Image (cartoon, coloured by chain):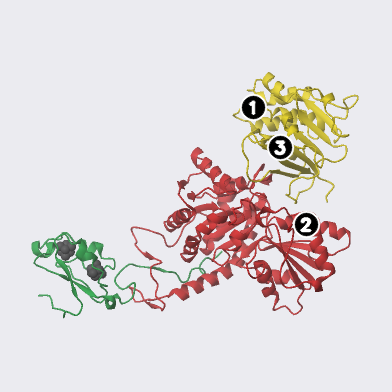
Amino acid sequence: MTTDKFCSMLSRSKPGPGDGGNTGSWRVLRPVINLEACIPAKRNKMACFHCWLYCPDSVVSKTIPPVINYDYCKGCGICAEECPAGAISMVDESTPLVEDK
Amino acid sequence: MHIIESGNVAAATGVKLSRAQVIAAYPITPQTPLTEKLSEFVESGELAAEYIPVESEHSAMAVCIAASTAGARAFTATSANGLLYMSEQLHWAVGARLPIVMCVANRGIGAPWTVWNDQQDTISQRDVGWIQIYANDHQQIIDAVIKAFRLAQTVSIPVMVCYDGYLLSHTYMPFEEPAQSSVDSFLPTFAPTHFLDPENPGNFNTVTLPDVRPDVEGVIAPGYIEIRHTLHQDLRAALDTFVEIDREFKKEFGRGGNPLIEEYRCEDADFVAVCIGSLSYQLRDVVDGMRENDVKIGVMGVQMYRPFPDEAIVRALAGKKGVIVFEKALSYGNQGALYADIKSALYKSAERPFIHNYILGLGGREIKTQHLLDALTASCTSPDTFEDAPRWIGLKL
Amino acid sequence: MRKDIIEIRWHGRGGQGAITAAKIVANAAFVSGYKGVVMAPTFGTERRGAPVFTSLKISKEKIYDLSPITTPDMVVVLDHTLLEEVNVVAGLKEKGLVVLNSPRPVSEYTFDGMTVAVSDVSKHAVEAGLPPGIVNSGIIGAFAKASGLVDIDVLVQAIENEFSGKKPEKNARSARIAYENTADNTADNTAIGGNK
Ligand code: SF4
Ligand code: SF4
């Protein structure tokens, strides 16, 4: 008995940025990482990454320094809440983006 | 081996033989002895399952959803208001395409409070998307449970096995308990293609946008309406799948052959009484009696109510003069749900029989054989005097 | 409607084991070739000590009607004090049989032309070594003698199966003693087994 014909369409997907669509457009406040305070950036060590771990949309990279993908960051502020170093601030979306140095 | 036990024990034995792995349930009359028996099986080691006591039916279904998502064979059971309390989770379980099996010992719904039998509980849940199978005796209960697990995992749709509360749940009659080895060869281990797996993380049933969209890998992912359309198509296809499964069951166990509808003396009948559940067996005696007086009448039990076996029913009723539908439930403010379904199925027939509707037995009101005889006689002898509205049997006030 | 069905109504009190007794008879009847066996307890609200009844229908053919018995062929009464609370012969068919657990002699009972069989099951159960109050195994012995429906040896086997782990021999003995000590109200004590 074949089961192939069943369940051709399901709501099951790989987690990753963009699974919920282009959520960057939802943002009202934008998380900005202060690299002077960010632990891995400051110590040049693979450490901390609470922002990477807690981001519900998996849009923060586990790199030195951590980078936020603003195409998909929905601006929920969880990363800022969880950052033990207080390195992430939520700034008004109307503030122009500054390129990382 | 034949044993004489209650319908609830027949159901529990079917669950044991099907090797359910997670059982979560909340007690409610008349289902309680079923899950009590299962907890005994788990306690004694006869059934290697996790028995999770919960604080409500809503949680029972939530636990089954979680267990099934993790790849376990999950089972629960309930009745009446308990079923309705888990209704929101019922929708979730089927939308998530989880092959959960649930027994429902049919009972009337409060208010006013009743513990006795009718079928308003499951009939009111007919549009959820679960498959509904109804059993007419204990043998059908135990067999249906085993078939339900196979069907559920084949089509990835949860299945309700329904049987009349008290009338079947608490009566004792003989039934054959199949051998474990036969059940094992009939029912393969549950091996889902998608399940919660830390090695292979996934999003299940997250917010799904109205439109299709590319997923993380750029593949176009279905929107809500596509997923629901698939469910509907799969439910329709499940009719044939169940016929196939029933055929295999018959090969293994020698029983079955009426997966969708069960006909009795219908072949040459002018009139056919139709109903769901044990009443269709009670009607057999009435039909036999009427046959002795040369009324050509038969009875048809609807075994699978959702998906609705419209084609099988239309075929069975082709060329009949009249159809009389008895129901222990109704779509309040309209008419009997089964009656409306059958009428709608017959609409495309070239020659439509007359069709009458009787509502009876609500809240356990005893269904007297004489009442059934009177109703059938009235329908067969003066079909033209009936309104489209249902007639109620056994009202005393 | 069907004439092939033997209807037996069991009267007891909640907790007294009338359901178990009827189930044992159902098992023994099935083993003896009655394919159709349906036992239906009173549905719903049961409490210890309250009068309850159980319907047992037996036939050589499959039984489809699950409704409670209204016109029994036999009634079995597990406790003679029930006679004050319940009309146990309600609906009993003409020349029906009443099987009664009572310490009083059968001559004290008249149920309007019915056959009455009496055994002091409570006493015999204690003789068999059971604690006082266990009557549901013993009454089966009286039923077997009076009805002649099912062989006592088959019933004793069914009792031992049902009570496995719960004093099977003593329950079986209780049934056998009651079987030997059942008297009926016919002149020569031979109406017994009349429904064979
Ligand atoms: S949580 Fe804060 S400190 Fe830690 S890596 Fe992220 S930004 Fe840096
Ligand atoms: S605000 Fe932070 S946690 Fe929220 S989506 Fe953006 S990066 Fe992720």
Residue that mark 2 sits on? B284
User: Please, what is the three-letter code of the amino acid marked with disc 1?
Assistant: Pro
Q: Residue B354 placed where, x, y %?
A: 77, 73
Q: Residue furthest front?
A: B397
Residue C117 at least partly seen? yes
Categorize mark 3 by other alpha carbons within 10 Å: few (<14), some (14-19), many (20+).
Answer: many
- Chain ID at mark 1: C
Most foreground residue, C163 or C44: C44
The residue sitting at 57% across, 58% down in the picture is: B160
Q: Residue B58 placed where, x, y %?
A: 47, 56
Alpha-carbon span between mark 2 and mark 1: 40 Å
The quadrant holding residue C156 is top right
- Chain ID at mark 2: B
Q: Residue B290 placed where, x, y %?
A: 85, 60
Residue that mark 1 sits on? C168
Image: C55 above or below B273 = above
- What hue represents chain C? yellow
User: Please, what is the three-letter code of the amino acid marked with disc 3?
Assistant: Ala
Image: C168 above or below B363 = above
- What hue represents chain B? red
User: Please, what is the three-letter code of the amino acid marked with disc 2?
Assistant: Arg
Q: Is residue B88 left or right of residue B292?
A: left
Asked if badge 2 and badge 1 are on a common chain, one would say no
Alpha-carbon span between mark 2 and mark 3: 25 Å
Residue that mark 3 sits on? C22
Image quadrant holding the N terminus of chain B, namely top right
Chain letter matching colour green: A
Most foreground residue, B268 or B134: B134
The residue sitting at 35% across, 74% down in the picture is: B215
